[in-house]
Amino acid sequence: APAKNLETFQQVVNRLFPRGNILTIEPSMNQNLKNHTMHPTRGHQWSIVSKLGWSDSTSSRQASSEKIGYVKVEGDFSWYTPLIGEKTLIFGFHCHAGRIFTLENRNIPFDDVFHVGGPMSVRGFDYGQISPTIMIGNMRNPIGAKKSIVVNFELIFPITADFSMKGRFFYDGGAGWDAPGTHGINSVDLEPILRNNSFHYRHSIGFGISMLQPQPMKIDVGL
């Protein structure tokens, strides 16, 4: 069984890290009306990003399962507003949702799948912990997801009068599901090692500090 698990894991890894060149087309729309890029107190920002990725091979014998072909669509929105004065208490909200479609049973590169969990999505979790993973022994190996959703709520307050250092209480939540690179692999081989492949919303609360001086820095602790 361990040898078979490793063989199945290697199949997935080969699909997530294929060799060759990839042609991508990335149309997008966005608007940024926040009053500060790094430390906003009011305003909103939104973006819609799409990406088409495609690769082919000079070898006619290469199977479609060894090539790249996908369409990725993402939506992102953030909003900030003062609750008690412009530099007293700020409410911040952010959400992100994404979906990836594979073309002709082709693959998605590891860098382009969604990795939910970690400081850039749901704080308090390890990188990719809330997305599909493959367990080999006691080691969790994140392989990413084709579908994701993340929400973040923050209450932001100044620690210094000029707002160059601020604290925040946050609530994060999200899920990543539908593993890439598993098409055509026997479900009997995948079932013992594949985790978090279905929608399972996880969340955390925590506290953080951000500062501009003496250099930009951000520290968050989530539970």
Image: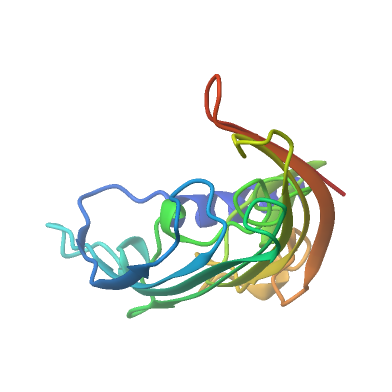
> How far from the left and from the top, in percent, is residue 18?
35, 51
| Numbered-mark total | 0
Residue 108 is left or right of residue 67, and the answer is: right
Q: Which of these two is toward me, 153 or 162?
A: 162
**Relative to 214, residue 90 above or below:** below
Residue 115 is left or right of residue 53, and the answer is: right
The residue drawn where x is 75% and y is 68% is 191
Residue 50 visible at all: no
**Relative to 12, residue 49 above or below:** below
The residue drawn where x is 80% and y is 66% is 202
> How far from the left and from the top, in percent, is residue 216?
53, 29
Q: Which of these two is toward me, 59 or 219?
A: 219
> In which quarter of the view is residue 45 placed?
bottom left
> How far from the left and from the top, in percent, is residue 57?
17, 59
> How far from the left and from the top, in percent, is residue 120?
60, 50
The residue drawn where x is 84% and y is 56% is 205
Q: Which of these two is toward me, 182 or 2?
A: 182
Q: Which of these two is toward me, 175 or 140?
A: 175
Residue 145 visible at all: yes
Coloration of the structure image: rainbow
In this view, which residue lies farthest toward the top? 214
In this view, which residue lies farthest toward the left? 58
Residue 111 is left or right of residue 61, and the answer is: right
